[in-house]
Amino acid sequence: MKKWCILLGIVIASAILTFCGNTVYAKGLGRDANAAKQLEFIRRNLSGLTQMKAEDSKGYYESALKDLQAITEKYAGTEESLEAKFYIGNVYSELHKYDDAIRWFDAVLSYGEINTNFKARALYFKAKALIGKGDIASAKEAVTQLRTVEPMAADSFGNELSGTMRIGAEAPAFNVADINGKTVDLEKYKGHLAILVFWATWCDPCIQEFPKIKKFYGKFKEQGVQFIGISLDDDIEDLRGFSTQEGIEWPQIFDGKRWKGAIPSLYHISILPTFVALDREGKVRYVGGDTEALTQIVTTLLSESKNLPLFR
């Protein structure tokens, strides 16, 4: 299972794969044979990590970051140094540290004249990091730039950037039963802040983030924040077993259709985990996979809501 649990609408050309080999061809930069050998060794190791479980690969990614940063410093002014920066951005994305990832992708893109193929890769993964962070507006800007150099890659984003999930829009309504047969009517959540958690037990990043999600729930449940889990699992027993094991208190919705499920389709979900924060009026205020950003948004919404009427 790929670590980001990403559903792509089309097959992306091999030129924009995360840790594939690449010729940078940056104007004005030299090349260094020793740096190239070190970078190739790191690249091969990183390629294997995408198939590992999140908890097993974290240490390897952090070690790779140190080695890559050493290359950027020791071989500054070379193509290998610039490519190392690109890999650093991807490693941070794999670790869900999206702000750091975006910073390194910007460092690559800020370098004047670079090969069109390499520029497309940097823009593609910058857009992915922005979506992961929940910054849809900036992601759209990155995809617009990407379209000028690699239209097929830009088209692959499809519904990830659809207008349905724009910030400030009314959240698509649903009224279904959870795994215990209890009705979950989103309309009745108006008057409360609500968090929709799209996830699955087969999704490694979801399991990696779960302790943070439970901590988040424990912090805000007494303040009236409501949670709804929407599972993309294949087997309801996997979901029930994990829910019992972890003591999940919030309702879980399941239909066994993965990405084609009614609610994931309604919300155009293509990355797991995805959190959707709704304000008291049922409007979308955040979409993304960053629990820290989600915490900031909810804290702000709670502060804003103190003097507002409840909409029930």
Image (spheres, grey):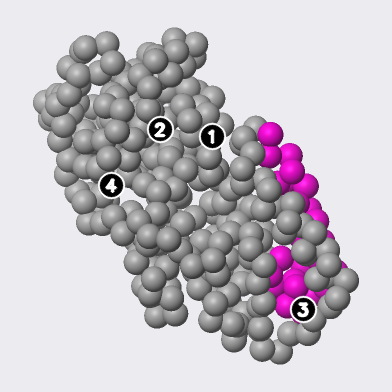
Q: Is residue 186 above or below residue 74?
A: above
Spatial separation of the CA atoms under disc 3 and disc 4: 41 Å
Extent of the magenta region = 56-84
Spatial separation of the CA atoms under disc 1 and disc 4: 20 Å
Q: Which of marks 4 and 1 precedes in the sequence?
A: 1
Taken as a whole, is the magenta stretch helix, strand or loop? Answer: helix
Taking the image as shown, residue 301 lies to the left or right of residue 59, namely: left
Residue 85 image point, x, y percent? 68, 65
Query: Callout 3 environment at 10 Å: few (<14), some (14 to 19), or many (20+)?
Result: many
Q: Residue 204, which numbered label? A: 1
Spatial separation of the CA atoms under disc 1 and disc 2: 10 Å
Q: Amino acid at mark 2?
A: Trp
Q: Which residue is mark 3?
A: 78
Q: Are marks 1 and 3 in contact (CB under 8 Å)?
A: no
SS category of the residue bearing label 4: loop
Q: Amino acid at mark 3?
A: Thr
At 35% from the left edge and 56% from the top edge, which residue is drawn? 9
Spatial separation of the CA atoms under disc 3 and disc 2: 41 Å
At 84% from the left edge and 78% from the top edge, which residue is drawn? 32
At 54% from the left edge and 77% from the top edge, which residue is drawn? 117
Instruction: Indicate the quadrant where residue 67 lies.
Output: bottom right
Q: Which of marks 4 and 3 precedes in the sequence?
A: 3
Q: Which of marks 3 and 1 precedes in the sequence?
A: 3
Q: Which of marks 2 and 4 precedes in the sequence?
A: 2
Q: Which residue is mark 4?
A: 268
Work out whether residue 263 or residue 310 is closer to the camera in this orientation and state it: 263
